[in-house]
Amino acid sequence: MKNSSILFFFLTLVLTGWNCGDAATSVKAPSDGAVLHGKISDAGDMKMFLDEWHFDNTTNVLGSTEIKSDGSFELPLDKGLQMGIYRMRIGAKKAFMAFDGTEKKVEVTGNLAEFDKFGFEVKGSNSATQLNTQLQKAIADPSDVEAIRVAAESAANPVVGGYLAMVFYRENEALLNSYKEVNAKLQKANKGSKYAQDFNNYVAGIEQRIAVRKANASLEVGKVAPDIDLPSPDGKNYKLSDLKGKVVLLDFWASWCGPCRKSNPHVVETYKKYKDKGFTVFSVSLDGIHPRMLPSLGNDQAKIDAQMESAKKKWVAAIERDQLLWDTHVSDLQHWNSPVAKMYNVKGIPNTYLIGRDGKIAKAGINPLSPTFNLEEEIKKLL
């Protein structure tokens, strides 16, 4: 049902049906240009627009023409056709076509009422033919993922490969490597073009969203807490997994975070009360150089080192001032750029996770001072 819904959505966009071969016609392409012509029998006296369509869903109108009463039309394109995806619009109907830039005369014939049922034919473009053929096969059998993958990766026109991937891959993690393969071909063949840049951005976004989903899934209650292995202020590394057997409050904080410093006395009080019963705290500081400050430091290592040393001193001073008694204080001093913070989906602090003796997450993304969360009661349940 899900696949059918997705395909139905895209069928409203992907309305094609092409064959290669030049039509026997007296229509001539402009010098160094191209011409789109043909006959849409039930579109008489309407207006047709041709757009260049991009992977970021933006369009450029290339031209328009009035369709004659018998449905025939002719649209000269003085600048010709470039490699890309194009959209023909007549009223509310749309048809997507792919060109490789070699086309001179492209003929479109059919019925407007049948556009959404592939009721038209395109002649004069190998790319259009390939796209149409693969769309027909994929829509006929969307479960044949392997056939769709092969078609996208082997497309002679890499823009066609990108289009097939966007329409049928969606955010399928199993096809991420194929996304990258299609992207590599597009970058090689059309480097620097808007199609190459947009598709590269699209794939990067897909990869990021997949990574976020995987990270979020690993942070669900009942999952083993992802391990952390970072240095303390004195250079000794501590691992979160070494605390298995204890109930652990994994606390993301920083010396510059007012709410964190406000919650520290409560955390200290809780630690004192339950430390002898098997409870401890693993503190990860997000001190360091703020990402916005990094560009101003450039490659001046002396300035970077000075800023890092200053951040470390503030971190140590906060530990001492707030009397955070446990040994397990760690940080990579990368502020919001900390890979560990990203791994735990930390977008604000204080942010804590309560981990059971078995190393599994019992509570996720909590604030120790939240009025709806009783830290002591939750700890007692796990001890």
Image: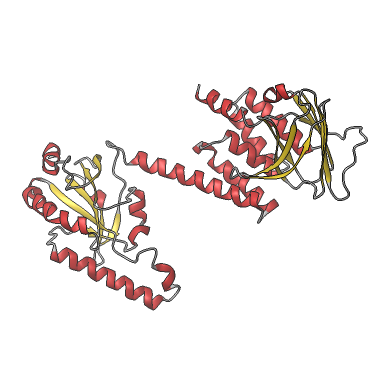
Q: Residue at x 65, y 36 (%)?
A: 150
Q: Residue at x 20, y 41 (%)?
A: 356
Q: How is the image coloured?
A: secondary structure
Q: Do we see residue 143 in this rendering?
A: no
Q: Residue at x 65, y 31 (%)?
A: 14
Q: Report x, y in % for residue 146.
A: 60, 32
Residue furthest right in the image: 26
Q: Quadrant of residue 122?
A: top right
Q: Report x, y in % for residue 315.
A: 23, 66
Relative to residue 344, is residue 24 drawn left or right?
A: right
Of 364 and 177, nearer the camera is: 364
Q: Report x, y in % for residue 104.
A: 84, 43
Of 348 and 12, nearer the camera is: 12
Say how many tags the image has: 0
Of 256 and 253, nearer the camera is: 256
Q: Quadrant of residue 95?
A: top right
Q: Residue at x 62, y 27 (%)?
A: 11
Quadrant in the picture for the C terminus: top left
Of 108 and 151, nearer the camera is: 108
Q: Do we see residue 257 in this rendering?
A: yes
Q: Quadrant of residue 166?
A: top right
Q: Report x, y in % for residue 109.
A: 80, 28
